[in-house]
Amino acid sequence: MYENVEVRQVFCNTLDKMMSENPKIVVLDADLAKANGTLSLRNKYADRAFDMGVAEQNMAGVAAGMAAYGFIPFIGSFTAFAARRICDQIAISITYAKRNVKIIGSDPGVSAELNGGTHMSMEDIGVLRSIPGIVIFEAADAVELEKALYQIVSYDGPVYIRLFRKVAPVIYNENYDFNLFKADVLKEGKDVTLLASGIMVNEALKACEILKEEGIMAEVINVHTIKPLDKETILNSVRKTGAVVTCENHNVIGGLKSAVAELLIEECPVYLKSVGVLDHFGEVAPMDYLMKKYNMTPENIVSAAKEAIKKGR
């Protein structure tokens, strides 16, 4: 069902179902409904789906006002604009005011591809993670996104959703149990823990198979919710393996690596290596090229895992 289906289409279909069941859900976009897959909702829900134009700050303010009157707004733009440009509105109008707004940041990290450096946000998690009261979520595939959206709409509070728009490899079975605040152990192992989020979960699973062929048993955990971290699952794994690699489609400063390092330095100091963007802006290029350029491939994860194991002993 999810093979060869763009994640944004699953996002739109799920929103459609939820809107048909809950008249309080509204959708606001900043001139990107076609890009984010929600254009069809305007025809079906003309009084609940709005184009706010290229005015992201205003969109966030309007959403906060609607939330104050009991609506559940989903607002969307590219990550560069959904996080960086409207950071102040998210902090003051939404999180400080405790408004129930769901923020969609599409095309995270290198997945922005041909949109280039100005639209390629490598820092959105870092920008938002330090703001009190916001949940940060990133799905590994379309199955997980669909299940997550139902829990996100039921959660009373602001949530930032990193949305990969294109076709993603299917990782999950449709019948699996999802918990927004619980990380998923996808592969059990004893030698090294691979903590991954978003598109990097599939890369970590590939790395796990390569390591297995060399006799190294890696534990792969999908950290879909980066804030708040599922400390229990991460610590249980790390105490067993004694070595960690974080894998993220984001700057290694401020994102998953930073969140995990903050946890480990207090609770379980072990050797940690990171795979992600090493403090660079993006550029115009296909995603495969960018993942190689920024050392985000399964082979890079394998090398990091071996180093973490060696130095951790």
Image (cartoon, rainbow, N blue to C red):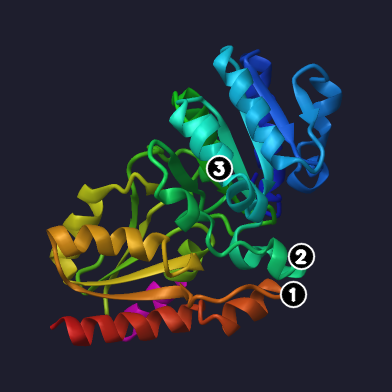
Mark closest to the chain's N terminus, 1 or 3: 3
Residue that label 1 marks: 284
Q: Quadrant of residue 157?
A: top left
Residue 88, which numbered label? 3
Q: Position of residue 173 (x, y in %)?
A: 48, 46
CB of mark 2 within 8 Å of CB of mark 1? yes
Q: Is residue 145 visible?
A: no
Verify whether residue 250 appears in magenta: no
Q: Identify the image quadrant of the C terminus.
A: bottom left
Local secondary structure at mark 3: helix
Mark closest to the chain's N terminus, 2 or 1: 2
- Within 10 Å of disc 1 (Cα), the crowding (few <14, some 14-19, many 20+) is some
Q: Position of residue 166 (x, y in %)?
A: 70, 56
**Residue type beneath disc 2:** Asn
Could you tell me which residue is drawn at 56 percent across and 46 percent down? 87
Name the front one of labels 1 and 3: 3
Q: In terms of depth relative to the viewer, which is nearer, 143 or 213?
A: 143
- Within 10 Å of disc 3 (Cα), the crowding (few <14, some 14-19, many 20+) is some
Q: CA distance from mark 1 to mark 3?
A: 28 Å
What span is in magenta? 206-214
Q: Position of residue 209 (x, y in %)?
A: 40, 75
Residue that label 2 marks: 115
- Within 10 Å of disc 2 (Cα), the crowding (few <14, some 14-19, many 20+) is some
In this picture, residue 206 sits left or right of residue 77? left
**Residue type beneath disc 1:** Val
Q: In terms of depth relative to the viewer, which is nearer, 222 or 156?
A: 156
Q: Is residue 249 above or below residue 42?
A: below
Q: Is residue 142 above or below residue 155?
A: below
Q: Quadrant of residue 191?
A: bottom left
Q: CA distance from mark 2 to mark 1?
A: 6 Å
In this view, the residue farthest toward the right is: 43
